[in-house]
Structures are given as structure tokens and as C-alpha cells.
Image (spheres, rainbow, N blue to C red):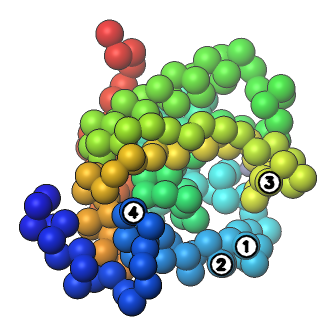
Amino acid sequence: MTEYLENLDDRADQFTLPGVPDAFQRLWTPHRIAYIQGDTTPKDGSCVFCVAPGQSEEESLVVARGESVYAVLNLYPYNAGHLLICPYRHVANYDEISAEEVLEMGTMVGEAIRTLRAVSGAHGFNLGVNQGKVAGAGIEEHLHQHVVPRWGQDSNFFPIVARSKAMPQLLGEMRDILRSSWFSGSSS
Ligand SMILES: [Zn+2]
């Protein structure tokens, strides 16, 4: 870690950067731009959250599967390890899902937190649902709960990996790590 920190100056650009150098943020930016431009819907108009669970293990970013919900890496992450917990059912609103789905979604959010904390050393998390376009939902037709890991300092391995990996490779690597490390069940 010390060596990594000493090398940061070599990698930073000419700007004075606040705190942690922003190379990590810049890595994700092109994908955020694609997202902002609305390029989120498959050409055939199908729902990405309905399609994802049926894709092959190799092409999908799904990391955990429950009975009624699943966890998938966000293709357009706010942060490394940004997960989405989705019901398999094509349901738009939180108040439309069943008691069983509510319970399993909550359980899987907890599993996501424990897994991300264990593998990436995340210090905190943003949890949330954007329901409806006006509330910021990128895909409003299919409910998805965001789980976004946050770090107080540059002490997790994701940004280090991110500096040297192309996005598809990075996402694939994270997916494999999360799949193999996924915590199931309660923390006790
Ligand atoms: Zn759907």
C-alpha cells in the first residue's frame, strides 16, 4: 500500500486533485456518459433486468441468485462494486412487490453489504431506490435497489485494479470475485 501511495504522483495528471486522485472516477466516466445519453435499452426494446438472469454465466453480470430476487453489477456504476438488487418479476414500484420479495430483497441487500465489505474493505454504503423518471430512475420499468460501496480513503483494491484494467475486464473480474465470495444468510 505504501508503494502504491508513493506512486500516485506519477499517475495523477497536472491538476491539483482533492484527496484521492481522480483517475478512478475518470475511468468510469465514459460509461456514465453513455448512461446519461440514454443508451440503456437493448435494441430490441427488451428489459435489461428481465434479460440479465437468463444470460449465460459468462456474459451476465449477475453475482447472486435468490428465489425471487437477484444481485447484478451495475454496468454504469457510480462506484466500483455498485450492485443492483432486482426482483425477477417485471415490476416497477416498491409497493407492488410481495411480502416475500420485500423480505428477500432486504436480505440480499444485507448479503451485498457483507460481501462488499469483506472483499473490498468498503467503509460505508449508499442504499436506495429511484422510483420513476422524475426521481432519477434510469430504467423505471423494473424495480432495482442500489447498493453503492463507499470508501473513506483509498484503501480498497478495486481502485488499484481499476487503474490498469479496461472496463469489461474490470467488471468481469469483480463479478467473479463477488460470485465466489458471496455471503448467504444472516451475519450471526
Ligand atoms: Zn423487466
- Apparent side of residue 5 relative to residue 147 in the rendered image (left or right): left
The residue positioned farthest toward the bottom in the image shown = 14
Q: Quadrant of residue 127?
A: top right
Task: Name the residue beneath numbered marker 3.
Answer: 136
How far apart are labels 3 and 4 at the CA level? 28 Å
How far apart are labels 2 and 1 at the CA level? 5 Å
Residue 42, position as x, y percentages in the image: 70, 71
Mark earlier in primary sequence (3, 4): 4
How far apart are labels 2 and 3 at the CA level? 15 Å
Task: Name the residue beneath numbered marker 2.
Answer: 33
Pick whichever, 118 or 139, lies toward us.
118
What element does badge 2 sit on? helix
How far apart are labels 4 and 2 at the CA level? 24 Å
Residue for point 43% across, 33% down: 113
| Callout 4 amino acid | Gly
The residue positioned farthest toward the top in the image shown = 188
- Apparent side of residue 137 relative to residue 112 in the rendered image (left or right): right
Task: Name the residue beneath numbered marker 4.
Answer: 19
